[in-house]
Image: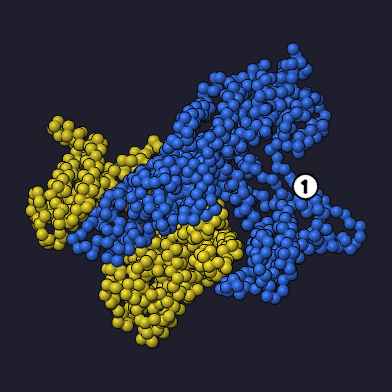
Chain colours: A blue, B yellow
Amino acid sequence: GTGADNDLYINQAIVFIEDAIQYRSINHRVDSKSLWLYRWYYSRTCQWILSLTITVILALAFIEKPSSLTITSDVRYRPPAWNPPCGLTESIELLCFLVFIVDVSVKSYLIGWEEFWKNKWLLAYILTLVVSVTDWIVSLSFFCTEDVRIRRILRPFFLLQNSSMMKKTLKSINSTLPEMASVVLLLAVHLSLFTMFAMLLFARTKDGQQDKEWVGYFRNLPDSLTTLLVLLTTANNPDVMIPAYSKNRAYSIFFILFTVLGNLFLMNLLTAIIYNQFRGYLLKSVQSSLFRRRLGIRAAFEVLSSLKETPANAQQSYVSVRALLQVLQKVEMDSRCKQAIMRSLKMCSCDQLSAAQFQKLFEELDKDAIKQHPPSPQYQSQFMQKIQFAFGHPCFGYLGNVVALANIVSICVVLVMDADKQPSERDDFFLGAINCFFILYYLLEMLLKILAMGLKRYLSYPSNRFDGLLTVILLVLEIATFAVYGFPHPGWRPEFMGLLSLWDMVRLVNMLIVFRFLRIIPNMKFMALVVTTLLDLVKNLRAFAGILVVVFYAFAITGIMLFKGAVVPMGNIRYVGNKHSTSWPFFNLSNFMVDLVLGGCRESQCDFVALFGHFQADVIYYLLYLLSVNLICRWAKIYFVAWWLISSVIWVNLFVALLLENFIHKWDRRCHREPLSDIEYQRTVELMFRDVLEEPTEEELMEKLHQHPHLQLCR
Amino acid sequence: GTGADNDLYINQAIVFIEDAIQYRSINHRVDSKSLWLYRWYYSRTCQWILSLTITVILALAFIEKPSSLTITSDVRYRPPAWNPPCGLTESIELLCFLVFIVDVSVKSYLIGWEEFWKNKWLLAYILTLVVSVTDWIVSLSFFCTEDVRIRRILRPFFLLQNSSMMKKTLKSINSTLPEMASVVLLLAVHLSLFTMFAMLLFARTKDGQQDKEWVGYFRNLPDSLTTLLVLLTTANNPDVMIPAYSKNRAYSIFFILFTVLGNLFLMNLLTAIIYNQFRGYLLKSVQSSLFRRRLGIRAAFEVLSSLKETPANAQQSYVSVRALLQVLQKVEMDSRCKQAIMRSLKMCSCDQLSAAQFQKLFEELDKDAIKQHPPSPQYQSQFMQKIQFAFGHPCFGYLGNVVALANIVSICVVLVMDADKQPSERDDFFLGAINCFFILYYLLEMLLKILAMGLKRYLSYPSNRFDGLLTVILLVLEIATFAVYGFPHPGWRPEFMGLLSLWDMVRLVNMLIVFRFLRIIPNMKFMALVVTTLLDLVKNLRAFAGILVVVFYAFAITGIMLFKGAVVPMGNIRYVGNKHSTSWPFFNLSNFMVDLVLGGCRESQCDFVALFGHFQADVIYYLLYLLSVNLICRWAKIYFVAWWLISSVIWVNLFVALLLENFIHKWDRRCHREPLSDIEYQRTVELMFRDVLEEPTEEELMEKLHQHPHLQLCR
């Protein structure tokens, strides 16, 4: 009937508008039941459950068998790790798989059968699930004693497929690969030619004294290749050239040539290529988001205009205001935007909206949210007004900064004076007294500011919130200290009492004071610019970081599987061999994150930190050094070189490219918008590019709408 | 008289056109005598003498007193250096000063008195000369025994002031300084806040076992600062965090936070800022060169149009073709351009040239020199024609590449097989025989190519020249080997004879063969692009490299003066102290280039290589490590940190910025010009930007001309 039809149209419009708000694709089924399912699937609860499931399945690795999440990383002192009984992690896993199966079914159903076959991500998702479940069954039938668990390597895929940003980024990276491969090929040619040169140049001589270089670095082909590869990371520079150089200065020419060509030119060329490919990346991604938003709004308009109550009009389609209001009631969106749209609708006296008017209404979504700070309280008394003027003035804020600086300086002085004292000689009185005074000042400052601005206005500034929170924490700590240890007096060195010693309390207070000093950031223009750039960057980097996590995880699990039991603690020195030696599961994830390992392991502790270290190219030195000294197989070498290429070379370059892109846009914009800088905008990436973005044309939108696989437009 | 006037105008025109060709400013005196002086000053001989003088005065440091230019860099084996007698280097210096005095006088005279006072470079030049000469006199009056020689630090200024490109670049760098300073300030804040945090976090504890981190890295304020500064260069990562990390994994958060903020964000921000500032740098510089060229041509036109023989024309000025021909005869310029201009002049039937026509004639200067390869010889015999077709075909070249590759592979195989053999067991027969065969093939290839292409055409390709030269050298070496050691046979291991042993000969041949393999570069598209980018970059980098040399030199001399006698070789370990210990002049230039030193010095040798190492940030680790371990004063620390900032941070970032700029332009252009890629252009930086450059307008040119301080235009 017509009523049912109208309801359907209204529901479609609601979903399309929500799609537009969330920048989602509108290519899904649009019948009543599917719409209900769609809204349910994208409801906050469902998405939250999905994210939680992904987190849980990824986190499982930390408690699964080869794991030891302990406080110390030193294998000598580490207590044996807790091994969960067989079936515990497996049943959690099964739950996760069930959620994923529901997820993939709903997704597949919603985009429809025909689209499903075209969607490679969904197919890969199903394949991954099938493999994982099979592996799970095998695992259970062996009572968890099997060695290889393929499903663990596949886990990060669940994270990947759930984020459209990550998929998009991966596509971008993929398109850069051919050029990157060319440079990597060049590097390989460079490396191999120089290796041959080196082997000829530093050949074994008859005089054993003369060939230190040969003995140390160029004994055979793999050694030479490793040496030069490490030189490319600059880690063994200049050690590697010292023996030859001390024989004859001219040998340095070889090394300098190699480093200049490889390090200065080819490596930076990689940066240039990646930057060149990514120059348009942000803009393109924002442009396509804009297109999705306009398309959603337009689709909503089209379905609303097919409502039967609207008088048929041959020339142009219209949407009645009443219908739109009905839709808006039910749409889930930011309440500020909703109110703004309602207001504009009421102000517009017309009864019907054209497509352009409709689109215009929703431009509110793209706008900066201009933040209105609540007004200061109006005091009657002249004295209060004066106080308000004095303490609401920016100068009072500056004074606060100066006092904070003075506090830092005083702490610094005490630290320098106490540096060489024994802990037993230390007198905490001076620091205690000083901090007491400063914390009182901070409290006073906060109270006066609240008095001048009113609590609401005070809290509406992020810097005040930061300030206030820290002041309150400091106050609590200080009161706790006095309660436990009494008031400070000369020779104030009480015994340990309660949770923390006095010295620890004082240190904690001091750290918080140092941290509080960051409140000066918004007062320094250039710093503020840098900080906002960084924050923007962090937003844009989420997709990259996600991909990094995926790669990281896969590498870690592969490493655990490859090197299981290969590293054994032997007294103080860890013995690294390729033998299947004993049961000690060195490679485990908590501890892996551990070690794409060996990285930082000078002694017998190394970990996640080591992996992080890998971002710094030089750490690979120790790695490759250890690799060449110890008996590690070729495969491990390849594994580590691959990790170096991905983490240290490619990812860091991607990061630099994004930073350049972001910063240059920001910088240009800063110059344009100087006069407006007083107003606080809540900036989004979309807004950064607003001046450059192209609005999609009517034709493009309509063409796209007519290609919709499930929506039949009347006209 | 009119004749004299005409001669003057002709001479002026000649000089202006030469100015235009060399992109020189035309703001100099234009009377007859000055013009003669000007042409003399800019003649090749004069400029060559000036360059030579600069080279000589800079090179003096290598033989001056604290110097030891020896083959080995090992202080233990180094023979005592040759000390020139007092007065030798001083008299050379005096000669150089005289040349500079002439130079500055001529320059000052030529630009005229008024301009002279505005020109800060000239004033600084004079000041430098005065100080240098005074210092020279002091030096002589002490019979060369004085310690401090200020004039040595001032020397690089002579290099700086002689290059307009370097002056321009310096100005650019100067304009980037405020932004760079902001980031460096940020870095300083970052560093100092984290230092305080670290000192509070890793404070001395009562339990001596627990504070390894404190003992090792955070003992006091300077130590902590140094540790974190070095961490910023990633050199002591992850060593620095291992003690704390092995106590509690959570400590890694501190280090990760520090490294991510400092290294990943702030350091790359510096890159972004420098790139942002330099984005327009190349374009702007090329644009101003173009303006100078157009201005010179226009000035020539204006003076020629004032020639009395030209009929006065109220509307427009003209230049007679005859006068222009007369000028062209005397102008010193590339003969190809001259002929092309003459040809166009003859083809143009008119007798008078307007300003536009005149300008157009000289556009020949901006054009690509399209290289015409000489034609192949025409053979009569059909057999010869077939041979010509076969061996002139590109496939024959590819075959040559394949053979070269096969040769390399064979060498590589032999190297791998021989890697572990004692030199006495080695049999040179196999390599000798193989190389003999391959060299014969190369010879044959060369001869056949010459037969097919003719000698001239063969030599007109750079790749063939490279190829042929190496083949000839290889042949000569091979013949020499056979002449001395006889033909190879199994067990071919003759005793040492002549200049080089057989093994050395074979190695040399092999190295040349590896080098010859580079002929494949032009056959690989991406490689060719990269190589041309690099060559362009080298051209554009000359100014930067010059500035680097200036900074380098100044640092080296300062270092020599600061640390004179501070480093003493003691057996195997070099003792570094701040005491004025003994006479051994460790810091000397040849040997300094040596050591902004200590850098690479693990043992007792280190040098120029060490300095080069500094470009790799991590070397500073050893440096600062040594600094903190040994008793070196604060000033040395500041000196080294300054050097690190300039060489490793700023210069490398400038390099990256230039590379990005160059590469991105090149890349864009490659996409546009794909179809034309067969023609060989002799590309210059100017041409790279031709599509983007703006032609200066008539008004701009005339306004500039009327501002000329010495030229009075009639109208």
Residue A536 percent across, percent down from the top left: 61, 47
Q: Nearer the viewer, residue A83 or B541?
A: A83
The residue lying at 15 percent from left, 34 percent from top is B384
Q: Residue at x 71, y 49 (%)?
A: A680
In the figure, B683 relative to A333: above or below? Answer: below
Q: Quadrant of residue B188?
A: bottom right
Q: Among all residues in the image, which is located at the extreme top?
A: A1
Q: Is residue A57 visible?
A: yes
Picture coordinates of residue A699 (x, y %)? 62, 25
Q: Which amino acid lies under the numbered mark 1 shown in the image of this protein? A: Gln
Q: Quadrant of the N terminus of chain B?
A: bottom left
The quarter of the image holding the C terminus of chain B is bottom right
User: Is residue B436 positioned above or below B112 on the image?
Assistant: above
Q: Answer with the quarter of the image where residue A638 lies.
A: top left
Q: Nearer the viewer, residue A320 or B104?
A: A320
Q: Count how many numbered circles sit on residues in the image.
A: 1
Residue, x 68% and y 38% (percent of image)? A366
For mark 1, give the secondary structure. Answer: loop
| Residue at screen point 77% across, 62% down | A443
Q: Is residue A241 left or right of residue B304?
A: left
Give left or right: position of A502 versus B587. Answer: right
Between residues B593 and B400, which one lies in front from this camera angle?
B593
Q: Is B193 in front, or is B531?
A: B193
Q: Indicate the position of residue B605 as horizontal and vertical percent values.
A: 33, 68
A281 with respect to A501 (left or right): left
Q: Which residue is mark 1?
A: A372
Q: Chain of mark 1?
A: A
Circle 1 crowding by C-alpha within 10 Å: few under 14, some 14–19, many from 20: few
Instruction: Left or right? Give the position of B388 relative to A661.
Output: left
Q: Is residue A654 visible?
A: no
Q: Compared with residue B458, is residue B709 higher up or lower down, i.e. above or below?
A: below
Residue B585 image offset from top left, x and y in percent:
35, 77
